Amino acid sequence: MVLHSFGLWEPIMLFFHSCGGQSRIVYTLIAAMCVLLSSLNIAFSGSFAESEIKRVDNPRPWIMVGLSPDGCSGGCRRLRSVICEMSGNKNVVTLDFKTATFEMISDLDPEFIVLSPQGTPWCRYTGPNGVALQNFLWLIPQIAEAIDVPILGICGGHQAIALAFGGKVGPIRAGMDDCMPYSRERQSGVTQLSQDTHDPIFVGLDDKIRIVESHYDEVKELPPGFVLLASEKTSRNQIIRHPYKPIYGIQGHPESFLGSRPDGGALLRNFIHIAESYNKNIRYSSKEKRINVSFNKLTKFVK
């Protein structure tokens, strides 16, 4: 009964109910008010019956692109598993960068795309792998504009986003065109990053972010218009974002996190939330009138 949810209202109402005349009118008004307040309480608390909760049995897929020469390597598979668990969406399609096409991705119309880590220096993608890599890098901006899908690049995927949009990538502490022996310089272990720009990807995090690093290459120059979100002295361009779309690159490995080191997990959860909000409020809000919207408009939808 709705009156029981209001505790102190019950004895007051019993008193008015025991009286006659005008007191019963007051009783009726109070009862009506209780019903209204109870309804509002349910509406704003999110307390709905199980049968009223809409469940999606077959969610729209998301795409994992393996960037290693052999496709989806160990790091790719771990990241895929973590995102499946975090998002609750196990409807994932894994693509090899060598065989991914615009038509394939367009037909899938994914919730978001994740570009995997990879351990092979970009300068060693030669022959057929080199041609396939360049074709895939040309594909990324087309996907971003025509399909308007959120994209997250991790480690090598972060560098692939930079290359795809006109940035420069090369070995740490070497020139952009060098292909040095990769036993020389490497950034590894837990590294502290500093936030350079406020962004929804940092919701719930402090200004200093601790993340696992393991890479030989780095983003030397940001693509035109891209925003530097977080940096570090050894390898500066650590977390980056497209100027007006939810396209992020993270140099570290946020999928490698523990209870005592939760920042990486928060970054992944925030990206999933950003993608969900962008799809709901911008990407699919007007299928017939697709327009480019400033990324700043998204921030009001992300809490």
Image (tube, rainbow, N blue to C red):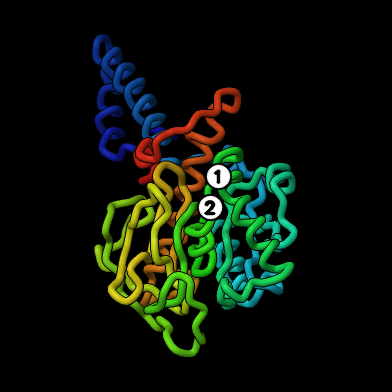
Q: Position of residue 18 (x, y in %)?
A: 29, 23
Q: CA distance from mark 2 to mark 1?
A: 8 Å
- On the rendered structure, is 32 left or right of 26? right
How many discs appear?
A: 2
Q: Position of residue 167 (x, y in %)?
A: 45, 58
- On the rendered structure, is 251 left or right of 74? left
Q: Hey, what amino acid is under mark 2?
A: Ile
- Residue 57 in view, yes or no: no
Question: Which residue is more in the foreground, 103 or 48?
Answer: 103
Q: Kindly identify which numbered label has been placed on residue 144.
A: 1
Q: Residue at x 44, y 33 (%)?
A: 293
Asked whether the residues under the numbered discs 2 and 1 touch, taking CB atoms below 8 Å apart as contact, a structural biologist would say: yes
Q: Give SS at disc 2.
A: strand
Q: Kindly identify which numbered label has been placed on residue 151.
A: 2
Q: Hey, what amino acid is under mark 1?
A: Ala
- On the rendered structure, is 232 left or right of 77? left
- In the picture, residue 19 is in which quadrant? top left
Q: Residue at x 42, y 66 (%)?
A: 219
In the rendered view, would you say 12 is above or below 143? above
